[in-house]
Image: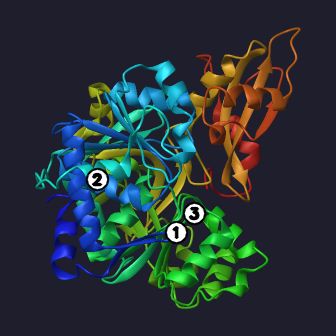
């Protein structure tokens, strides 16, 4: 099982059908496959060998599609960099993984000097944008033109396919190692459970492809065969126009995107009737918003996915049929095909149905482990089960309901934010004596990053100042959106900050501790 199988199949069966659409560029499967084989040859010429990591810092595009396949074609390992990170976070992932070849587009080419000033290990930068070629960079199109196609090495199975960095509870990102088998198993399981893509369909990719949810949607369409439409970023008007213009059949959106799409004043100006499936996730969708979405996309099936990077990412799905039962709308759904889910106590013993415990999962879609972190790997994969860090319960029909997070994580607008990362940044401000970061309910973002601050005696600091300080050290989306200044923190007898006490006033009427 290898990720390039889908490409070979579609070239064999429908070589002259459209493969990718990006702006004015439209290419067939035959054309794209030739470009991929040539780009793989160019990567070989750059000195890359099987197992080497190759980075990409870029927005969604047809070249993102070609990059992924070309790296796998030559036997490499993809390392898609989170475009919303600070430069220091980006460099950490590149240096820790030994990623020495980096692809950048126009939006991020100007960051390269700063990245190189923080780490001198980046040997080659390839420009994959549409603007002029920056000095000192190789040109994406020239690499394709100047090299002959090479054969697919067909690495697969448990060979490492990608490093996908996610936030860490210690304040440092962790590189999640996913194999060809794990990514393909997740796609097969999702498709078998919930037909989110079909042969000949057209998927619109607007959620960033460095995220596993978006990558899974991309790979599902690759598996089924069909076309990919790429937008570099979410813009309600652009999304509506692309759906109508390109006859899009399937979408992946987070609830905040759905809200923005429906609230746009020209929502009714475009024909959205071709959309057959809308997948959403990352946070709970409100029932009124879901009703509006179903009205806006009358021919579409809706499904909610729950997962995590470490599971490639599928764990459960709430299918379109499940949406007809109002009782289930707060559920994360049931285990996808080829994946087992349990709810366990602190000793990893399965608890009775309806009892809250930790959600654990296993299957061939589970990660190989964390890059260079054997201790964290062993802890996360105790007994062969991935411990999600989410607290929930399972009903008698196997539906999972998430009620809290055991791990100290916030999900805001579809992005995972670990409290430790934010607290480490805030603690570096000279006026901060202690701080605690929690997630609080937010109508737009699902959860909002909220900081509780104790200032040092004689010091002052405004919320805006602390937010800007944090943004110099971590990605802007991780910086707190709201602040609360207190004289002292609630502490346990052992001196640990009681975050549940800090969260309780914000969540006490919701029946949940997370969205």
Element type at mark 2: helix
Q: CA distance from mark 2 to mark 3?
A: 35 Å
State which mark lies toward you, 3 or 1: 1
Residue 404 vs residue 225: left or right?
right
Q: How far across and how far down the image is residue 93, in percent?
A: 41, 31
* Residue in front for this viewpoint, 158 or 289: 158
Specify the farthest residue to the top: 458
Which sits earlier in the primary sequence, circle 3 or circle 1?
Answer: 1
* Residue in front for this viewpoint, 481 or 146: 146
Q: How far across and how far down the image is residue 416, in percent?
A: 53, 45
**Which residue is tagged 3?**
254
Q: CA distance from mark 1 to mark 2?
A: 20 Å
Residue at image position (36%, 59%) is 65
**Which residue is tagged 2?**
144
**Which residue is tagged 1?**
23
Q: How far across and how far down the image is residue 3, in percent?
A: 21, 59
């Amino acid at each position: 099982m290898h990720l390039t199988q889908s490409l070979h199949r579609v070239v064999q069966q429908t070589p002259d059908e459209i493969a990718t659409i990006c702006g004015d560029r439209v290419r067939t499967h035959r054309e794209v496959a030739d470009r991929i084989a040539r780009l793989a040859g160019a990567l070989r010429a750059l000195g890359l060998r099987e197992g080497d990591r190759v980075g990409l810092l870029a927005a969604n595009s047809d070249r993102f599609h070609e990059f992924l396949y070309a790296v796998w074609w030559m036997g490499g390992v993809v390392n898609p960099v989170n475009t919303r990170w600070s430069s220091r976070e980006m460099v950490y992932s590149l240096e820790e993984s030994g990623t020495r070849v980096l692809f950048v587009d126009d939006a991020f080419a100007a960051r390269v000097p700063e990245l190189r000033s923080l780490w001198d290990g980046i040997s080659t930068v390839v420009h994959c944008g549409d603007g002029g070629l920056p000095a000192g960079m190789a040109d994406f199109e020239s690499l394709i033109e100047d090299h002959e196609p090479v054969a697919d090495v067909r690495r697969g199975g448990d060979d490492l396919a990608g490093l996908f960095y996610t936030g860490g509870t210690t304040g440092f990102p962790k590189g999640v190692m996913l194999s060809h088998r794990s990514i393909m198993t997740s796609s097969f399981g999702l498709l078998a459970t919930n037909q989110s893509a079909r042969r000949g369909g057209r998927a619109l990719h607007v959620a960033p492809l460095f995220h596993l949810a978006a990558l899974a949607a991309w790979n599902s369409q690759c598996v089924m065969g069909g076309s990919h439409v790429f937008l570099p970023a979410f813009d309600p008007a652009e999304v509506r126009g692309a759906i109508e213009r390109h006859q899009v059949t399937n979408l992946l959106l987070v609830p905040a995107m759905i809200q923005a799409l429906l609230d746009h004043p020209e929502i009714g100006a475009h024909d959205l009737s071709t959309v057959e499936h809308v997948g959403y996730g990352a946070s709970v969708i409100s029932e009124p918003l879901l009703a509006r979405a179903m009205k806006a996309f009358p021919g579409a099936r809706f499904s909610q996915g729950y997962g995590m990077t470490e599971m490639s990412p599928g764990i459960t799905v709430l299918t379109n049929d499940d949406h007809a039962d109002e009782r289930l709308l707060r559920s994360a759904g049931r285990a996808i095909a080829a994946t087992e889910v349990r709810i366990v106590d602190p000793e990893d013993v399965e608890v009775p149905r309806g009892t809250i415990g930790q959600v654990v999962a296993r299957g061939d879609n589970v990660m190989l482990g964390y890059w260079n972190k054997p201790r964290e790997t062993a802890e996360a994969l105790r007994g062969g089960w991935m411990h999600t860090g989410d607290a929930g319960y399972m009903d008698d029909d196997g539906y999972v309901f998430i009620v809290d997070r055991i791990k100290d994580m916030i999900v805001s607008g579809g992005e995972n934010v670990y409290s430790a990362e934010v607290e480490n940044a805030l603690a570096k401000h000279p006026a901060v004596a202690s701080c605690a970061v929690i997630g609080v309910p937010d109508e737009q973002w699902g959860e909002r990053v909220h900081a509780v601050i104790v200032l040092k005696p004689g010091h002052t600091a405004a919320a805006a100042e602390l937010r800007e300080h944090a943004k110099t050290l971590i990605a802007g989306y991780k910086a707190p959106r709201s602040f609360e200044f207190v004289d002292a923190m609630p502490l346990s007898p052992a001196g640990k900050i009681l975050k549940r006490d800090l969260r309780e006033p914000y969540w006490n009427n919701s029946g949940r501790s997370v969205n």
